[in-house]
Image (cartoon, grey):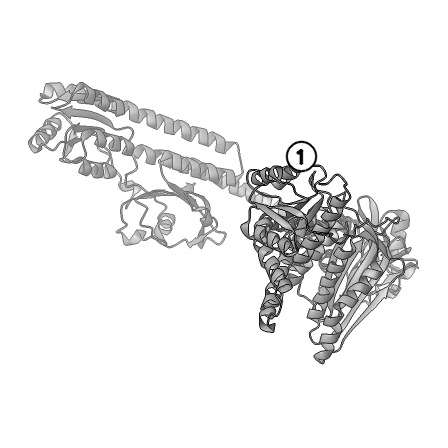
Amino acid sequence: MQPLGAIHSTTLPEVLVVDDERGLRIAICEMLGTHGYEAVGTGSAEEALQILQGQDFDIVLTDLMMPGMDGIAFLKAALGTDPQLVAIMMTGQGTVETAVEAMRIGAFDYVMKPFRSATLLPIVERALEVRRLRVENAELRDTLAMRALSEAIGFTLDHRVILDKMADAAVAQCDADEATILLPTGSGNDLYVAAVRGQGRSHLLGEKIPSNQGIAGWVAHNQEGVTLLGAVNDSRFTPVHPRGDILAAISMPMLVAGKFVGILNVNSLRRRAFRLGQIRGLSILVSTGAAALQHGLLYADILESQEQHRLTAERLQTMNDFAHTVGGTLDLDSILQALVGEVPHALSCGWCAVVKHLPAEGAFSVRAAWSQRAALTAAGATASGASASEMVLDTGSYYFAQDTRDSGIPPLVGLPLQAVSSYLSVPIRVDDMFWGTLDVGFDEPGAVSQDRIEFLEAVASHLSAAIRNADLHSRLRDAFDEIKVAQAQIVQQERLSALGQMASGIAHDFNNTLAPILGFSELLLDSLEGLDEKSRGYLEVIRTAAGDAAGVVRRLREFYRPNDAGEEFETIDLNGVVEQTLLLTQPRWKDQMLGGGKALRVESDLEPRATVLGSGSQLREALMNVILNAVDALSEGGHITVSTHSEERGVLLEVRDTGPGMSEEVRSRCLEPFFSTKGTRGTGLGLPMVYGVVQRHHGSLDIASEIGVGTTVRIWLPSASESVPARERRTAPDAEGPLRILVVDDEPAVREFVAASLVADGHYVETADDGSDGLQRFHSGQFDLVLTDRAMPRMNGDQLAAAVKAASPQTPVILLTGFGDLMEPLGDRPAGVDLVLSKPVGLRALREGVVQAAALYRQDPTSS
């Protein structure tokens, strides 16, 4: 690093000779030296690049073919370091193509080896002239840029604009990577960063450094610029914050008539010396910019002084504090409390209050109040009568009293006149509607002035906006809460629907697996006599487990069951459903609890004529789940109340318990399928099933719970507008005699169970493993009944039923499917099917189905 004053320039043109042939290199340097050139030679392109990083050259003579980096690669790198460099290529093995390539990337000319001085010197002279023109053009561009900058600076007094333009111009002028402008603080003890350029350096803005330390301290003290190239080895210039990545730098003082204004620093992260032209241009920039910056800073001081007077006059400090409070919260009570605490400081008053008008009551309420010594009406108090707020409401304008001894109207109802000496009340309007008043009181008479009136009205205007925003936020929050509830309901419905679809997808395979387990266990229990109790117990367990598994699949499918407009509901006495369900659950909530020594009381509060349209079985199952959940929660005893009430929105069915209650997290998830807090004792399907039943009945479900208080489940159901007769149910007569039955199913286990059960009842049975085989057997024989699966390869059950009816309309067809419990209520029975049985079918259901089919068979006298 050295002072700028130590930088010198040579009058001799400088030439860098790059050739790996030492003798030729020396000869060229000597020849150029005798003809007025200062020549430096090197034997490798790599070393030449290092030399170019630290010294400017006018011309470079380079060999084409060299070990390591060749002449073409070197030329590209050299021009990247100094775009104004003029290059001449020397080659003894070159071709036209290599010469063209050299010229293309920027070589000025080339010369073929061996050559004489008479050949080389004219080329070097022309190259030197080109170099001179290039440098002059670059300096001219720099001068024009500086002139444009000076003009731009001359048209503004904004010191921030001047700083930005100077920083940008410094980076451009020196082809640098970073720039920093330091200005002295008011005390002069420090320098602070006023402008900065460079990647990732914006955080430096405003940072302070001591004005007597480091490079900047030396420049400020000596008012002389310095340059840096490489590492700093001078103790005078030790940086305050050393950085090893800065390889070149310039630090220049900004002076105006000998007065120190600041420092301009320019850094390069590449090792290259700044050209003299760049340094001269930077000096012009610093000189011009310093004067403009001085004027800008003086103008800024004037503006700041004017602004300070304006802020003081208008009491903007208080307004800013209030604006900050309003910006930080939308809670109206917090805003009002902050306001009544700030206004007294600005107006030097003894008390301040915000009073809300209550039109419906014809009164006013104190929303917020602050007092230094007077006994104000407490915030929240409501009163009517003569007051300053009443006068503002009547006149629509502000009201004041300069001396309360001469006024018969108190500032607030209930506030003694002697509590203050003078007061002022201004209106608060929200959306052009009178909202209330902002009131202040003073300890001295005659304190109400025009500037205080204007200030308080300005505060009231800001308060009006804050009240409006708080009201909008409150309404928005309420609307958002409603949206969240609706969204949660939609998500819950979609979740249940997805679960139902999944269950429906696996129901066929699952039910086919359960069918033989349930069927054969029932068949064994029914047919084996003399079975020992242990074996019979095992079979009972198998049958019960299979039935429970089938029930799980059925309940899962219920989630997907849609609200079908064609589903027939009956007029249901909801009170009867409650009484039946309490009777069904009594073993749990009475006998078991009493047997365990626990006191559990279950009561009902039923309003007469609580009728709804619905399915009694579904409502009973739903209510049973809710009651049993309450019983499980009351493991130590308690109280359960089941009630019905007629409301405007329908009939309310409510189950309330005094259990431990649920946390908000548990309550928000209790309708999720498989979510349970009972561990292995719960499936997590009870409440989701209840939700599905309520949805199918076009009702709504709400669950409220509080820890330590209990849980309340509310179900709203549409009331029955008129009585709808219950659907007729056919009662199957007893079968008379054996039947010829064709059993068609692609599952061997199901087919074997159905056939075995029918044979055990004395029927003649033939089987087929798919629809096509079944149709062939039907055509080749005579059958009284066809019992077929629905989902089969080649020909499904629907197609088989249609084909059977086409051939023999009087032959009954029973469809055995895993979706039977959904098909019948929704009227989805396929054409040609007389009866639908659900898989897994039990022995009793199978027998009843055959009996019903036999009745259909006997009703047709043409049956053969």
Q: Is residue 323 visible?
A: no
- The answer to whether 94 appears left or right of 80 in the picture is left
The quadrant where residue 380 appears: bottom right
Residue 853 place in picture, x, y as percent: 72, 47
Looking at this rendering, what residue extends furthest in the bottom direction? 597
**Is 755 situated left or right of 644 in this image?**
left
Q: Quadrant of residue 247?
A: top left
Which residue is painted at 39% across and 34% down in the image?
Answer: 172
Amino acid at the residue labelled 1: Ala
Is 449 located above or below residue 153 in the figure?
below
The residue positioned 48% from the left and 54% from the top of the image is: 187
Left or right side of 564 for 168: left
Q: Residues within 10 Å of mark 1 (few under 14, many from 20)?
A: few
Q: Position of residue 441 (x, y in %)?
A: 81, 59
Q: Position of residue 388 (x, y in %)?
A: 87, 56
Residue nearest the viewer, comparing 529 with 831: 529
Q: Position of residue 720 (x, y in %)?
A: 86, 51
What residue sits 53% from the left and 43% below the top? Answer: 298
Kindly state the secondary structure of the residue where label 1 is placed. helix
**In the rendered image, which quarter is residue 756 located in?**
bottom right
- Is residue 359 visible in this depiction of the protein? yes
Residue indicated by mark 1: 807
